[in-house]
Image (cartoon, grey):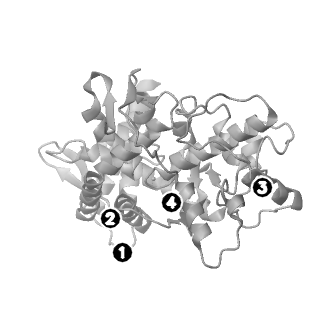
C-alpha cells in the first residue's frame, strides 16, 4: 500500500496552507556522555558557546526579514484588496516588535511597502510594491510546485516518530500557524520496503566514493560531517573525543528502537541517535534552520530524552545555535557556506530575493510620498498620545 498522510476531522486542507513553510528552511565538547562539563545554568552554557560571525550576521538580517514577512502576511490576508490601514498596524506595533512604530518601519523599506492615502477611508493605507508582489507570487508558485515534496517530508517526519504520529499543534507551530487543539497527524499505510535513507548517509556515500578519498570506510559508517566556528580552540583531548564519538554505532532516525539500554554505551548510542534525528529534521526544512522552540515540540514524539538546546551546544561541529532577535535558532552547519545555502531551492531563492529588498532599505529610491508619510507619522503619534492619556 502506498504512503498516505491522514489527519483526524478532515483538517488536511487547512494544514496545506500552513505546512508550506516546512519547505520554506554549541557547546565545545562533543557529547554529554563523553565529556563531563562543570555545572552551569542554561543561560551560561549558551553564552559560553563559540560564536560564528557568518551565522550571527545572517541572523541580524533575518531579524528584520521576519518583521517584514509578518506585515506582508497581514497585507495579503485580504486577496480582494491586499492592503492594510496604518492605524491598524500602529495598534499592532508592540506585538509585531515595531519598536519605532508602524510608519517608521514602513518608511524604512520603500522597496517593499508603499504608503498611500485612501480618500474613501479618510486615512493612510499600505500595500506591497510591484517588486514585493512579484517576489510573493514567485514564492507562491514555488510552494505549489513543491507540494509533492512537502508530502514526502511529512511522511519522513512521521516515520521518525515511534508511534508514527505527531501532534498537529507542533506542525502548525513549525509553520507559524495557530492550532491549539489536540488532534494528531498520523501516518496510514506501509512504509517503502527499503525504507528511507537519511541525508547523512548520502554524504558518507559521496565521501567514500571520492577518488582521492583516504578515509577508512569503517570509520565513515557512523560519521557526521563536522566544521567549527573560526577561532574555536580544538584541543587534543577534544579531537580524540570527537574521533571516538564518530565511530560510535547508533540506530538511524528511520530505524525502530527495540528498547532503550540504561548502560553507558546504550546512553551514548541514544544520544547519537538524537543527533541523527535532529540532523535529519533540519535537512527536511527549506532553509536548513529552525527555532529551537519549534523543534522541541517533537522531542517526546521522537523519543529524545535529552535537552534539545544542550544537544546543539554539545555538537558545535554539526549545529550552530544563534540567539539573535530574542529567539534561539539552530542551523545545520554543513548546509551553509558564507551565509548561503550550498544547495538552494526555488522557495529559498524567492525568500532570498525578499531579503535582498529588505537589505536595500531606502537605498536607490528618492524620498517618496514624504508629505503623506510625515502626515501619517504625526497621526500615529497623536493616536499614541490619546491612548496614553486615556490609560492614565
The x and y percentages for residue 177 are 38, 36
Residue bearing the label numbered 1: 364
How many marks can you see?
Answer: 4
Q: Secondary structure at mark 4?
A: helix
Q: Is residue 181 above or below residue 368?
A: above
Query: Which one is earlier in the sequence, the residue at label 3 or at label 4?
Result: 4
Query: Which one is earlier in the sequence, the residue at label 2 or at label 1?
Result: 2
Residue bearing the label numbered 4: 61
Residue drawn at x 39%, y 31% as measured from the top left: 387
Query: Which one is earlier in the sequence, the residue at label 3 or at label 1?
Result: 3
| Residue 49 visible (yes or no) | no
Residue bearing the label numbered 2: 111
The x and y percentages for residue 392 are 47, 24
Separation of residues labelled 3 and 4 (CA atoms): 33 Å
Separation of residues labelled 3 and 1 (CA atoms): 49 Å
Separation of residues labelled 2 and 4 (CA atoms): 16 Å
Separation of residues labelled 2 and 3 (CA atoms): 47 Å
Q: Seen from this angle, which residue lies furthest bottom?
A: 212
Closer-to-camera residue (374/238): 238
Is the Cβ of the residue at disc 2 closer than 8 Å to that at disc 4? no
Left or right of residue 325, residue 69 in this image: left
Residue bearing the label numbered 3: 242
Q: Secondary structure at mark 3?
A: helix
The x and y percentages for residue 391 are 44, 25
Q: Name the front one of labels 2 and 3.
A: 3
Q: Secondary structure at mark 2?
A: loop
Separation of residues labelled 1 and 4 (CA atoms): 19 Å
Is the Cβ of the residue at disc 2 closer than 8 Å to that at disc 1? yes
The x and y percentages for residue 120 are 11, 44
Separation of residues labelled 2 and 1 (CA atoms): 9 Å
Amino acid at each position: 500500500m502506498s504512503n498516505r498522510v491522514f489527519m483526524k476531522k478532515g483538517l488536511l486542507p487547512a494544514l496545506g496552507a500552513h505546512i508550506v513553510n516546512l519547505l520554506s528552511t554549541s557547546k565545545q565538547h562533543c557529547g554529554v556522555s563523553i565529556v563531563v562539563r562543570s555545572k552551569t545554568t542554561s543561560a551560561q552554557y549558551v553564552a559560553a558557546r563559540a560564536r560564528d560571525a557568518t551565522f550571527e550576521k545572517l541572523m541580524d538580517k533575518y531579524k528584520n526579514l521576519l518583521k517584514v514577512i509578518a506585515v506582508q502576511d497581514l497585507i495579503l490576508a485580504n486577496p480582494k484588496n491586499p492592503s492594510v490601514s496604518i492605524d491598524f498596524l500602529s495598534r499592532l506595533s508592540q506585538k509585531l516588535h515595531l519598536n519605532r512604530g508602524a510608519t517608521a518601519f514602513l518608511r524604512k523599506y520603500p522597496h517593499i511597502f508603499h504608503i498611500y492615502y485612501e480618500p474613501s477611508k479618510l486615512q493612510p493605507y499600505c500595500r506591497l510594491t510591484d517588486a514585493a508582489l512579484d517576489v510573493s507570487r514567485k514564492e507562491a508558485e514555488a510552494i505549489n510546485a513543491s507540494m509533492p515534496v512537502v508530502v514526502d517530508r511529512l511522511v519522513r517526519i512521521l516515520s521518525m516518530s515511534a508511534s508514527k504520529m505527531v501532534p498537529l499543534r507542533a506542525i502548525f507551530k513549525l509553520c507559524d500557524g495557530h492550532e491549539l487543539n489536540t488532534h494528531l497527524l498520523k501516518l496510514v499505510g506501509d512504509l517503502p520496503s527499503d525504507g528511507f535513507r537519511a541525508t547523512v548517509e548520502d554524504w558518507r556515500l559521496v565521501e567514500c566514493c571520492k577518488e582521492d578519498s583516504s578515509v577508512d570506510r569503517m570509520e565513515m559508517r557512523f560519521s557526521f560531517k563536522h566544521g567549527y566556528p573560526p577561532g574555536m580552540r580544538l584541543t587534543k583531548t577534544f579531537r580524540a573525543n570527537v574521533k571516538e564519538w564518530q565511530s560510535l554505532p547508533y540506530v538511524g532516525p528511520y530505524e525502530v528502537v527495540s528498547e532503550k539500554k540504561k548502560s553507558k554505551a546504550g546512553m551514548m548510542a541514544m544520544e547519537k541517535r538524537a543527533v541523527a534525528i535532529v540532523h535529519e529534521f533540519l535537512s527536511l526544512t527549506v532553509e536548513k534552520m529552525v527555532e529551537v522552540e519549534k523543534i522541541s515540540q517533537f522531542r517526546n514524539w521522537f523519543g529524545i530524552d535529552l535537552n534539545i538546546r544542550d544537544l546543539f551546544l554539545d555538537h558545535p561541529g554539526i549545529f550552530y545555535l544563534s540567539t539573535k532577535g530574542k529567539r534561539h535558532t539552530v542551523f545545520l552547519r554543513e548546509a551553509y557556506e558564507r551565509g548561503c545555502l550550498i544547495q538552494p531551492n526555488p522557495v529559498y531563492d524567492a525568500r532570498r530575493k525578499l531579503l535582498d529588498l529588505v537589505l536595500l532599505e531606502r537605498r536607490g529610491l528618492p524620498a517618496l510620498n514624504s508629505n503623506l508619510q510625515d502626515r501619517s507619522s504625526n497621526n500615529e503619534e497623536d493616536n499614541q498620545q490619546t491612548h496614553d492619556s486615556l490609560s492614565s
